[in-house]
Structure formats: C-alpha cells, structure tokens
Image (cartoon, grey):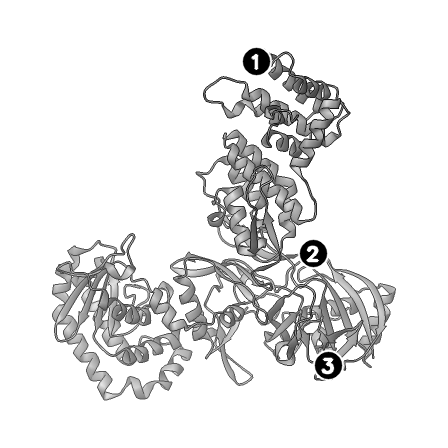
Amino acid sequence: MKALSFNLSGKFAHFKKPDVNSYAYFTYSHIHKIALLGIIGAILGLEGYKRDLKDYPEFYEKLKDFKISIIPKKPYFSKKMIYFNNSVGYASREEGGNLIVREQWLEKPQWEILILENETEEFKELKNRLFKKEFAFIPYLGKNDHFAKIENIKEIEFKRGEKDLVCVSLIPKNKAVLKKHPRFGEQFFYSEFLPVALKKKFLIYEYEEMILSSWIVECKDENYFEYNNENLYFI
Amino acid sequence: MIKDIINNLDIDFEKAIIDNYQLKDGLYVKINERFEFFIYKKPKKDDKEKGLKDLKGNIRIEEYKWFAKRDYLSSYLNSNKAIDPPAKKIHSNNYLTLFAKAKEFNDENKSHFISKLYDGLKDFHIFTKREEKKIIESFKDYIFSENRQKDIENKKKKFLEIFDEIKEKKSLIKDNEYIKIFFDEDIKKYEKEANIYFVLKIFNKIETIKEIEGEIYGLSDFNMGLNAKKPYLTHKTRGFELPFMVKKDEVFLLKKLFDLLKYQNKPIDIAADKDKNGIFVVKHSKNDQAEITEFDILIKGNRLNQSFVYRYFLENKEEEEIKTYNSLFELIDKTLYNGTLKNNLFGDVYNKLAKELQNLIYLTRDAMLLIKKGDLKPLFVINKKYTDRFIEFYLRQNREDKAKEILNLELSLLNYQGDNMDIKKSLKEMENKIVSLEELSEDEFFILAGQIIRYLLNQSEKKDKRADMIEPFLRASKVKKLKQEIETLYFNYKHKIPLNFQKFNNALALVEGFGGDKVKKDKLLVGILSDNIFYKKDEK
C-alpha cells in the first residue's frame, strides 16, 4: 500500500469547538478529519463553505472518501487562552464597536499526516501539487491567523497490519481493543469526541470518540496498517 | 467539549444536583391542608440546610430536601424564559409553585398572578408560536384532563385564600428576597408539569428547532447565545448559521450538567487513568448560571514518571520525595507563592498581594497550571528564568528562611533535570582555593562574593537588620559595581574584622582581583544564602 505523507505543523492552531460561545472558543486537542480535508481542499483550490447552502461544500463532496491517518508528534500540545479585540467596527454593534474575543490556542502543534492512495483525479492532483509545492490557497490551521507549515513531503509504502502493536495515530475508540501496556515508555491516554463527518445540508459536525494511547492495540480490521513497526489507523 | 465532560463525570447527576442545591434567601410557604411558613437565610459557616427555620425560629433541616427538589424542578430557566413576558414577575414554571420577589406581592399583581399562572397554564394559551402550539398539542391529553383542570381551580382558590396572609408576612424578609409558594404534591406531579415548560423553553429559541435526518434538533442554550449585536456569534460563512444543534433527548442532559456545574465550587480536576482520559474544567458564575472558562483533556495519570526529590542543599535535613503532579504543584505553591497561587490561577490576581508577587504570578501561573496537566517543561524554563526573582522578593521582605527554601527548590528542580550541584562540595573546594590563593572560577567568584556580603552584613550591630541593606547587591548587574559595593560595605565594618583573619583577607583579595563583566545573580544568591565559611573554625 502507498500513501502520501507530510508533516503538518505551525506556531499555533485553533480548531473551534462549536458547542459553547458565551465566554470563550475552545479548541480540539488535535486536528480533525474535516479540518484536514479543508487543508487539502485549499491546496487543490476547491471551494469551501458558501453562504448559499448546498448539500455539501465542494471540498467535502470530493474528498470525504479519502482515507487519512493523523499521527500526533506529541500526545499533548499545551493550550493557552488568548484574549484579543476585534475592532473592525462591524464585529460588534454595541457601543464602541469593539468585540472582545477569547480563544484557546494550541501551542506548536505538529502532526504527521498520511493520505492513502486512491484512484481519484483529486489524489493525483494533490500529489502533483504537494511535490511541486504549488498550492492554490494558503493552508492554515483552523484560522487564517495560524499558517500551516507543510514539509517533509514523501511517498511511503507499508503493509496491512498483522500484529498487535502500539497505534500511533488517532483511532476511533470503538475500533480499538486495548491489549496491554508496553513495558517501557511513558503512559498516557487521550480521548475526545472529534468531528468525523458533516451532516448533509446543515453542515453540522457528526462526532466520534477518538483515542490516542500508549497501549498495544489489537489489530482487527482492514483499516490497520503497519509502518515503522507501529500500527496506524486510517479514518 | 460538553460531551467530553458528561462522559467523564461518572456520577448520578440528579442526586448530585439536589445534594448541592442552594436555596435562595426568602420566605418559603408549603401549602397542604394547613399553611406552613419557613424562612431561609444562607448560613455563613454552617451547612446550608441549617438556614431553614420555621417562624418560631426552630431549625428545620428535614424540610430542606423537600424544598430543594421542588425548587430545582420549578425554577424558570432564565429571565428571558419567564412564563409571563414582558412583566417577568413570575420566576417559577408551573402552577404548583409561585416564585416572585417579595415586593411583587401586592394587590395590583394579584390578578397578574391569577391570569398568567393559573389561567395561563390551564390551557397554555399564553404560548402562541407555531412550534409551541405543536408541542402543546402533543401534551393535550394530559393538559386538558379533567383532574388537572379541577386541580388548577382548587389551587387558584387556595392561593386567593392565603394571599393576604402572605402579604402580611412579607415584612419578615427583605424586599428583593423571594417569596416561594409550594403546594404539597408528589414529586412526580411536579416533574410532569415542569416537563411541559422545559420542552417548550429548553432550546435557545423555539424557532431554531429543525428536523435533521429524521431527528429533532434545536440550538443549544447552555453557554451559547446569539446576541444580535454580535453578528459573528453565528457561523456567517457556513451557510447554515446556527453554531451548535442538540438532539431533543440530549438537551436535558446538557441542562443537568450545567446545573451541576453551577453548585460546583472547585475546579473539576480528574486525572487520567490507564485506560481513561481525565478532564480539567473551571467555571465561573454569570447571571446565576455556570459558564465554563477553562477546559482541557488530561492524558496522564497523577503519578510522576520519576519521583521528584526535594533536597535540602543548605541545611542538614532529610530529603522529601514527591510522587504526584498534584503534590508537586502544592509544594511549589507553598514554596514560591506562599500558598497564594491556588486561588489566583485564573482571572485577576488578588490585588492585596505585594505588587512584585502579583507580577510574578501573572508571569508564571500558566506554566504552573501545566504541572497539573502533566507537562513539566514550562516549569523548568520558569525555574531558570524567574526563581531568582522570587528569592530576591523574599530577601527584600527580610524572609531569609523563605529565600532558602526557594533556593533548595530551584536546585532540586535542576537536579531533577540532571543538572547536579553540590553546594557543600563546592564551598569546600572554594575554601581550599582561598587558603592557597588559587585563581577562582567565575561561578566560585560570585558564590564567594555572596559569602563576603553575608559575613559583612552580619557585622552590623543594628538590632533589626533591614532588608534594604542587601538591596544594592541585588541591584548590581555589573561586576565592577558589585565590587564597589562590597568595598563600601567593607569600609563600614572593617573595624570589626580581626587583623589577622587570613581566610577573609585572602577571600577579599581574590574577589578584588577578579575581572568579569556581568553578575551571575543565581550564584551570588547561592553565596548569600548558603552556610558561611567565615564562621567555620579551621579544621586542624
């Protein structure tokens, strides 16, 4: 099996959680599939969300069947609450026209992203553009305040998973059977409800609980792949 | 995020809410065959239950839960969701209760209460929107049942009977405290009545109810607002502008979570387990509702990978072993911040603290918070950058014991990172060099300078040695300046130094002979705070 691989990083990132807005906007701890498809869409020059509502925006329509794997370089990126003003005038119609914004940002996040090879035109185009570094739009991490750094672009080959190994990528909780802990190394367990799909027409997120842990995970379906003596999962 | 919190709180929400439920101050009336009056005033120290008294002044703890359960069910969601807009005088949501401010209990409002509460909720005709009518239609068998209709008439009559008596008792409480009337009915009945109100009002706006793929969704109303004056609260670019839709059967769980948070006084801090993540939630209260101000997912257990050893480098004391992130945090809070950090992790730092300490808290607290989350790297950076400022702060306050503790902590942290420093050994080596007048290394120079300063300062016969005596040395940033200050100090106290005190004379000569530029303050502080070599008798 082949996949495109690149390193995705930045100084900061903010992947907005839509569930609260009264005090601050919080961020997911890691990039999620939809934000990632958005970045790929930006590279390819596909259309994003628009004010007139169609079934799906172009990027999602064309890329939603891509199989991707998100491998965090660190299980935890520190988060910090950032305060700033939006004083453009139309941001707030209250007196003074100043909108105070609080946002939680991730600090120095870094992931390795794998995109499984497929037959679509989009994939060919993506490969082409990645290697030539010709991006249609500037990719960013959740907000255009945070430029994305894409580097170390390569094509890698690996095989289907056969053994129970540590899974270094995000994996849906219900797909992971925890077997045991490796004898060495630090223990950690991350899980969070992350967006995995968009609802048609309304474009609200559908969620799935994803985990990342130091456990050895049972390799039990065809979405597992072995690479560098570790397991990966494609979502 | 909300789902992550709900998933992580492995408790019976309803029980926890009632256990922590806080009644508001006011007059409570329980109506069955007789009328019973109670006055609740939140006690300052005691358990909240002890605040409930009858009119004779007897404490009635046993009634607290009865009221708490019914009060919780019957309160309106917020003032925008009162059942009697635009007056918003009734703060309850069903005809079994009437909550209103004491000042509203007058003859003018009597008819208001009757028409909005009893007549209004008899057939829910006060709810006129299309979506509301649809919901009421689905409850119609219950709402228009003969029993219920009769019951409402009965309650109305009773209310009219008791109204004047309540009006008289109004003087027992303050004007803007509550009068709350409860009919003595089974909790099930309360649930049924309140449920109709909640279904009507629980979403942010009833107009936001949408059917998505066969299921009913509505805009969440918890920590979520669409203030028309802040256009960016809606998702302007997505097409569908409502930010967060909740399923009809999940929205009640959200309500329970925020009700639970409301009575939570401390941050929720659950460390991760082997196969479970932890969470960290901080909230404050806004308009009588909980608002989440800080959230994070914790991925490490509380146990440190490698225990931290707090060594007493300056004294001969047994070292302490620290095994968890939380106790490390506590040690640091106690040592560096005098225990003030815990309560000043968020928001404005308490302004009665010393200015310098306030500044230091602002500069360092984010890194300290990360200790609780299992990330020690920022702590190490802060240790190198700021601990000397803490030491200086306490030295200026004339708290040498505290300064020593911090120096111990600083060195222990460096030690934890693998950077060893053995003060006793380096003092010993330095002493040998002094005797033989060998050249000093840069580090040794500053330690020795610190020792000399300390020794000279001790010669002062002032009864109460003031912290500003040390000030010029803390301020000196250039070696030249430091040497000048030492000279001045020496001339002040040289009459007290024995003529043939060879060790001291050598040391002074070595220090005078050193050429350097910038002062290494950390080493200087080590010299000031560690055992003074000039007091030691020469071993023979």
| Crowding near the residue tagged with mark 3, few <14, some 14–19, many ≥20 C-alpha atoms within 10 Å | some
Q: Amino acid at mark 2?
A: Lys
Chain letter of the residue beneath label 3 in the structure image:
A
Label 1 vs label 2: CA separation?
59 Å
Q: Secondary structure at mark 1?
A: helix
Residue at position x 63%, y 42% in the image:
B411
Give the residue pinned by disc 1.
B496
Q: Secondary structure at mark 3?
A: loop
Q: Position of residue B223 (x, y in %)?
A: 47, 63
Q: Nearer the viewer, mark 1 or mark 2?
A: 1
Q: Secondary structure at mark 2?
A: loop
Q: Is residue A38 shown left or right of residue B333?
A: right
Give the label on residue A223, or none: 3
Give the label on residue B537, or none: none
Q: Position of residue A51 (x, y in %)?
A: 63, 69
Q: Position of residue B12 (x, y in %)?
A: 41, 73
| Crowding near the residue tagged with mark 1, few <14, some 14–19, many ≥20 C-alpha atoms within 10 Å | few
Residue at position x 17%, y 58% in the image:
B170
Tell me whether the residue at label 1 lies in contact with that at label 3, contact meaning CB atoms closer than 8 angstroms: no
Give the label on residue A108, or none: 2
